Amino acid sequence: MEPDLWYLYRHMFRSRLFEQVVQVFWEQGLISFDMHMGYGEEAIAAGIVCQMVDGDAMALDHRGTPPLLMRGIEPTLILRELMGRPDGLCGGLGGHMHLYSREHLCASSGIVGSSGPAGAGFALAAQYLRPGTLAIAFFGEGAINQGMLLESMNLAVAWQLPLLFVCKDDKWSISTRSASVTGGELVERARGFGLHTVEVDGADVEAVWHSAGEAMKRTRDGGGPTFLHAHCVHLEGHHLGFFLFRVGRDQIKEMIPLLGPLLRSATRRKGGSSRERIRSLTDIATRPRDAVKEQTQKEKDPLYRTRQKLISDRDRLEALEAEINVEIQDVMEVALED
Amino acid sequence: MRTMSFDETIEDVLAQTMADDPRIILFGEDVQLFQANLYTQFGGRRIRDTPISEGAFLGAAITAAMAGMRPVVEVSLVDFLGVAMDALLNQASKLETFSGGKWKAPFVLRTTCGGGLGGGGQHQQSLWGWLSHIPGLTVVVPSTPADAGGLLFSALQHDGPVIYMTHKLFTDFWVENLGYLGRKTVDFDLPLAGMRGTVPEKWEPIPFGQAAIKRSGVDLTIISVGVGVHRTLEAAVMLEEEGIDTCVIDLRTVSPMDTAAICEAVSSTGRLLVVDEDYQGFGLSGELAAIILEAGINANYGRVCTEKTIPYSRELEAQTLPNKERIVEGAIELMDRS
């Protein structure tokens, strides 16, 4: 079976446009704290969530907007929740890192790695109460060293749970390069637990759709859990207003106030060798630049990639985008109503 | 006297003590960039980024300390200690007793706590009562730069585990990186008197278990800690206009607690109001009532605390965390009782 690329693009574009409204609201101060965007993850979300059925469950991390939208949750409810309104998805009590929908069996958490155990429990209920359904656990590669996530992988294999572990790998754990704090290869690690594994380009929605589809079919048929390793970028970094991106995008303006203290520290009498100090300074200077460079490449943007495949039918593409534009404009206006 | 911000104070004490004591190393999530100045001065061997594996690196700090080092461990937010509680609950706190008093683990766990930035219930808890409940842990919660420096200086000389908690609202770094994030469209009720202040030319240790009398008064004693101290001092000015003369005590360390100062102050006014940003039930506020009762002091008692999960909505958050209006109300209610 082949995926309906138009259908997948519709979901991805809708998510992107919705999050652009979220970004505007956040910039206007209508949304508080560090807003984590799904920009760059849309192909992973669409390729998986669009194949979910009634009774399937999702354990989400702090980046839950795209999967929830694609699962069919009313966008106005999400937007109002992010604004902390009493008529939001969770009464304005949860907020952007804690989005829940009981009727869709979706639960989020802002604690890194906690979607592992959450996914395992959803999968247990699926196995026990609703055979043929499954659970998805979304997390980033930064979570891959969190004990509870690794324990969940073992549990899922030991109990043959219908669970798909989805690792969205952007190579950065906030401001730390994940490779610098992670041993071995992730797929090999997952295989060590006895998980089926698959590695995929997370910007290629068709590839995600195919590999996730196979894994989901397998697990629905009782074939056990899968670890899906999807590579992606985060076009706005860890969250909106992320300091690494602010520095990386405007090094001169953002670095100037930091320079004095850094140079004073570099020349203090006691401490590391001059070689160590130079290495630290170089690291501090290159991380922001590298993060921005790696995360904002156009060809790694799933929207751009998918759109290129559809652009030959420009009329249909523009009509689709115009239609979604109208919908999201309307969502924005309704969300702002008293 | 010098003037310093809360952040500068902590960095200054760490830089000085690390220069003098090579056994001190600092590790935690993102510390190389969050503590870029120390990373520059001391290099990557002594300032180490960790994976998001709190259970592993916090547990490792204990035995590293037992084997001769003096680790300073950073867990960004106290809420994240949930995944690493074994290290504190069953290991660090028990060592001295289990070894028959022969072995101690001198390490400092630095973390942030508290709310007021619109971050909801999973990133803004206080939890000093929860941690102080465990025998064997020292829990420090400074409310001014001078106290922050003196208490950190003591923590780095202490022979057992110290949990050193910084309220997010005191630090420019966290207010910027979780609150403003480059925006001018959001406002926060910042405790300015605690964010910046005079500090001694030369750091001297402030002993644990020594409260500070922030204001003397004859009608009512209010005891608080952290940002609550500043909310209380503002409330005390409003109470003065009502003709109520308030004594304000800052505990500075929750465990050990300055029982003598508490009893003396409450005996003289006959009224105790506790202002605690931590949860109301089974915590600091109840402990203070018990201390007064055990000492046989006849006093009227009231409390203004966080009574439930902190809501995401900024408006509801402001009502949930102790604010000066609620403190004034609680004080007047207590005065009216007798």
Image (tube, coloured by chain):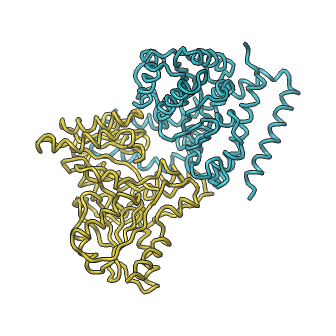
Chain colours: A cyan, B yellow
Front residue (pair A92, B9): A92
Q: Residue furthest bottom?
A: B243
Front residue (pair A86, B248): A86
- The quadrant the N terminus of chain B occupies is bottom left
Relative image position of residue A126 (x, y in whole percent) = 56, 26
Front residue (pair A299, A42): A42
Relative to A198, B98 lies left or right:
left
Q: Which quadrant of the structure image shows residue A182? A: top left
Residue A286 visible at all: no
Relative to A241, B1 lies left or right:
left
| Residue under the point 28% across and 64% down | B200
Give the mark count.
0
Q: Residue furthest right?
A: A315
Q: Residue furthest front?
A: A129
Relative to B259, B39 lies left or right:
right
Does residue A96 sit above or below A55 in this rendering?
A: below
- The quadrant the C terminus of chain B occupies is bottom left
Relative image position of residue B141 (x, y in whole percent) = 34, 58
Residue B255 visible at all: yes
Relative image position of residue A61 (x, y in whole percent) = 54, 36
Front residue (pair B161, B294): B294
| Residue under the point 73% across and 18% down | A3
Does residue B336 sit above or below B64 in this rendering?
A: below
Does residue B42 sit above or below B269 in this rendering?
A: above
Relative image position of residue B164 (x, y in whole percent) = 32, 52
